[in-house]
Image (cartoon, grey):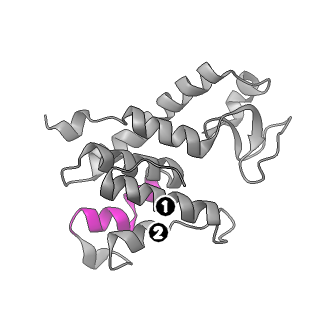
Amino acid sequence: MSGKEVMSVSTKGINFLKQVEALRTEPYDDATGEEINNWTRGATIGYGHLIPNNEWEKYKDGIDEDKAEKLLKTDLKPFERVVRRNVTKELDQSQFDALVILAFNIGKSGLRTSSVLKILNGNPGQANYNSLEAAWKAYNRNHTGKVNEGLKNRRRAELKIYNRGNYKVW
């Protein structure tokens, strides 16, 4: 078993995500940031935890910071797995963290089908971009397709983690 198979997000990676996602102890609509009293698609709580309709009752009255941190660590597991299973090159800790953070934002299938993954795995001819940086920065649009400054900042920060091990939030 290689180190990549047992790798998980570091404390630095979790702390970065906590800063970027920002703690919200009451349910809110991820698209608008407004608190909500009824389930809607995009209902979110904690550090970016999407609330499925069948879990609304569990979260509708809010959570505390400890529960939010536990939720984040649980939520990261499938994203850690998708990086471990799909990236064929050896990664150092900061590269692994950056990829998990990216996948957490764009989704597991988003990462699996991304030009980022194609370039990392040595298949640049199949990618839509000519560099890892360009492919990574392409994920700068919100759910409506509009370029979003927050996402542009996040992509730049993720690339600093990937390239330099710099976990500074903009």
Q: Residue 146 sits in which quadrant?
A: bottom right
Q: Amino acid at mark 1?
A: Arg
Give the vertical position of 139 relative to 134 (above or below): above
- Tag 2 residue: 137
Residue drawn where x is 33% and y is 50% of the image: 165
Where residue 141 appears, as percent x and y from the top left, is: 60, 67
Mark 2 in CB contact with mark 1 (< 8 angstroms)? yes
Residue that appears at 28% across and 46% down: 85
Question: Residue at the location (73% across, 47% down)?
Answer: 41
Q: Amino acid at mark 2?
A: Lys
By secondary structure, the bulk of the magenta-drawn segment is best described as: helix
The residue stretch that appears in magenta = 108-122
Can residue 126 be found in the magenta stretch?
no
Q: Quadrant of residue 127?
A: bottom left
Q: Using the image, determine if residue 26 lies above or below residue 124.
A: above
C-alpha gap between disc 2 and disc 1: 6 Å
Q: Which mark is residue 123?
A: none
